[in-house]
Amino acid sequence: MKHISATSRIVLSLVSLGITLLMAAQLLGLFPDKRDLIMHGRSQLCESIAVNFSLLAEHTDVTTMKTSLTVIAQRNKDIRSLGVRRANGEFVFQIGDHAQNWLDAPQGHSTETHMYVPVTRQGEKWGTIEVCFQSINAPGIASHPFLLLVLFMSASSMLVFYWYLSKVLRQLNPSNVVPSRVRNALDTLAEGLLVLDPKGRIVLANSAFSSTTGRSLDSLMGRFADELDWTSEDENTGEIALAKSQPWTNVLQDGQARRGQLMGLQTQKGKTFVVNAAPINDNNGKQRGCITSFEDVTKLQLKKAELVQMLQTLRQSADKIRKQNHELERLATRDPLTGCFNRRSFFDHFEAFWAEANRHQENLACVMVDIDHFKAINDTHGHAMGDDVLRKVADCLKKSVRDYDILARFGGEEFSIIMPRTSMDDAVHVAERIRKDLESLKFPKVKITASLGVSGTLLNPASPQDLLEQADQCLYVAKRLGRNQVVRFDEMPVEMAENADIDRAGKEHATQHQSASIPFPAVTALISAMGYRDIETASHSRRVANLCVAVGQGLMSLSSCHVLETAALLHDIGKIGVPDSILLKRTMLTAEEWEVMRQHDRIGVEIIRASFGSEELSGIVENYRRHFSERTLSGDPIPLGARILAIADAFDSMTTDRSYRKGRTTEVAFAELIRCSGTQFDGEIVGRFIEAVKIQQRQAPQPKVGRETILGIGLELERLASAVDQQDLTGLKAMASRLAETSYKQGAPEIAGKAIELEKLVSANTDMLGILKSANQLLELCRATQDSFLGTMHSDDAQAAQLESVQ
C-alpha cells in the first residue's frame, strides 16, 4: 500500500464500499433466490395440472389424461416421471420409470422433488397425480449469480471510478494545482518539505523529502505524517525510540511554531533531521495547515559526535599528562640514586621552614651527615659498591627521620637533614641514633661509619646558609676528632671551627668575607621565568649548576658552594632581554646577532646585582667568561667560582646538540678542556672537573630526552590542551609554535613536527575537528614519551631495589 497512489486508494475504497453494500442487500433478501423461483414454478405447474385433470376426471377420460401428461413431461425437462394413482392406491398409468422414482417419496406431503397433485370429481377425491422432479442443484462458486454480480460490479466500477476520479481529483491534487515553476523551486531545496492539512495529512511533498525517506511522491499524498515511524532521542536515557510527539502535531494543536527538534526515521536508520514546523494561516488568520521542513544533518551530527568524543579524549589525555607532569616534578626534586631530595629542592623547603620558624619563633635544627672514608670505598671496591652504600645509607636515614623532616643528598657522600620544631638536644639525640644505625649496617667486605654535625636556630645563624655552614663546620670537626661521632655547634671551640673552615675550603677562602643571604625562592622564580622564555637555556643552566656543585664540594666552603650553584643557575639570566628572533633562532647566528647576544652578560649581572646584592655572586657571573690567565677589573685573580663555572659552561655547551650542529662527545669535550688548560681554564680544576663528570654520569646516566625537557614539554602541553579545550585558536597557535621551538631545541623532533602540523592547521583555519585530531595526536605522542621516560626511571628504581635485596 505504501506505493499506491492516492487516486488508486480512493478507487479501492469506493469499490470496497460498493461490494459491502451488495453483500448487505443480499443478507437483507433484496436479491431473489433461484430455488424459491424454481419451487414457485413447480407449484404453479402442479396447480395447473390439478385444475386440468379435475375436468378430465369428471368424464373418466384416462386416455386424454395420459396424452396430456406425456406432453407435459416431454416439454418440462425438470420432470423425471409422472404417475396417476387412484384414491385406493392403484396406479392408473405412469410415464417414465415412475414406480422406481417414487420409492423414496415421503408420505402425505410434497417436497422439491416429489409433489402430490390431488384430483377431485364431483367434490370427492378421485385420485392423485404424482410428479417426480429433478433435484434442484446449487450453482458452482464460479457460476453463482451473486458472485458474478460482485465481480462484474468490482471490475466495472473500478475502471469507471478510476477514470472519473482521475479527471475530478486532478483539480484537487496540490502537485497539479501548484504551478510547475513553484514545484520546481521547492524541488531544488536541499531540505525536505511537507505541507500538511489541518488533520496532519500530507498534501504536498518535495523531491528532497521523497528521496530522503525513500518513498514516492504519490505514496506520500494523503497519508498522515505521523504514520512514517518517526524516532527521537530520549532526553533521560539518550536512547533512540519512536517519537512520542511530533512538532507538526503540536503546531496544529496550538498554532505555535516549533524549531530545531532532532528526529529520525525508523526505516532510515542512522539519518538525523532538524525539523522546523510553522502554521499556515489564511487571510483571516484561521489555521489551514502546517508547513514542515526536514534538514538532513546526519553528517553534522556524526561530526558533532566525533567532535565531542575527540574533546573527551583530549581532556583524558590532558589529565594523563597533568598526572605525569606531577610525577616528573616529583622526580625532578629527587636524587636519582638515593631517592632523597636533591639540593635545589632541599633549598626550596629549607627557605620555607626557615621563614616559618622565624614567624612562630620555633626551633629549627640542621644535621649534616658525611660517610667516613667513602673515597676509599670507591677506590678499593669499585663504584658499584659505593653506589650500594649510598642507597643503603639513604634508606637508613629515611627510617630515622620524621615524615615532615627534609632529607636531602647534599652532594657526593654528604646528606643534610632539616628538622622543624626540634631543639638542639633532640637533634643531637636523633643524630646519635643515626650514627649508631649507620655503624650497624652490614656490607660485604666493607664496614662504614659516619660523622655528623648539628646546629640550630637557637644559636643565632644569620641565614639558612649560615645554619648549614655551622652544621658543616661541626661535621669537619667531627672528622678531625677521629670520625664516627656527633659534634654540636654550641659545644665546639672557636679555634676548631676556624681550623675546620681552613680544611674545608683551603687557605684561599678561609678568610673570605660573609656573603649576603641569597633567598633561594627568588632564584627559582628567575630560572622558571627563563624556562618559560626559553626552556633550552633553563635546562642548560640547571645542568651547569649540577656540574659546578660536583666540582665545588671539597674546594670551597658550603656557603660558597651554594653561591656558586646560584651563579650557575643564573649565569644566562640576561637572555631574558634578548629578542626572540635571535634567542629562538634555529640557524647559526650572524656576527651582528652574536654581538646582541653577548650583551646578555651585562644584563644578567645587572639583574643579579639588583635582585640579591651579593658581591660574591655578582663577581662569579661577571668574571666567568674571562680567561684563567686574566685578571678582574679590580686587578684580582679570577674567583674560584668563576673558574669552575667557566669550565662547566663550556663543557655543557660543547656536548649539547644545537639546531645548526651536533653536540660533541664527552671525550672530545674533555680533550678540548685539557687543550685550553693553563690559558682559558684553570688546569687543576679541569682535572677535578673531568673526574666529577665521570662520577656523575656513572651515577645518573642521562636519557636521550632529559627529565627536565620532558617536564618542560609536558607543562607546555598542559597550556596547549587548555587552549584547545577553550577553543582559543589564537592562543593555540602561539602555544603550538612555542612547543615546536622548545621540542626542536630539546631533541624531541617528533613532538616538534606534530606541533608544527598543528600550528599550520590553526593558521589555515581548518575545521575544529581536524585541529582536535592533530592536538590529540600531539598529546598522545607526548604521553608516550613521558610513559617511556617514567617507565625507564621506575625500572631503574626497581632494579636498584632488587640489587639491594640480593646484597
Image (cartoon, grey):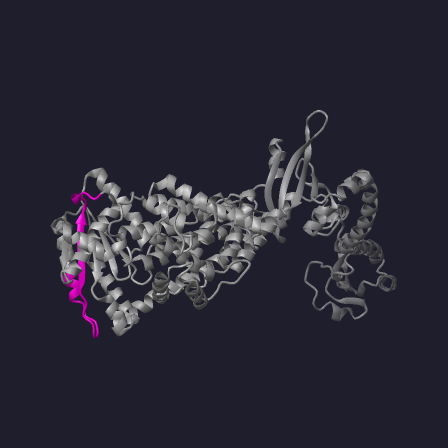
Front residue of 399 and 749: 749
Tell how many labels: 0
Q: Quadrant of the C terminus?
A: bottom left
Up the image or down, 67 lies above or below 5; here it is below
465 with respect to 137 (left or right): left
Q: Does residue 730 appear in the picture of this structure?
A: yes
Q: Can residue 806 be seen by looking at this rendering?
A: no
Query: Is 408 situated left or right of 144 in this image?
Result: left
**Which residue range is magenta in the image?**
435-461
Position of 512 with respect to 170 (left or right) is left
Give the answer, above or below, for where 492 lies relative to 282: below
Q: Name, please, the residue furthest toward the top.
A: 284
Which of 146 and 121 lies nearest the eye of the viewer?
Answer: 146
Please provide percent x and percent y for residue 141. 74, 60
Residue 491 vs residue 471: left or right? left
Q: Residue furthest front?
A: 635
Tell me what residue is drawn at x 46 percent, y 62 percent: 655
Q: Position of residue 652 (x, y in %)?
A: 43, 59
Between 626 and 537, the one lying in front of the other is 626
Which percent across, then down, holds residue 758? Answer: 57, 52
360 inside magenta stretch: no
Whole-percent x, y for residue 583 in the image: 52, 49
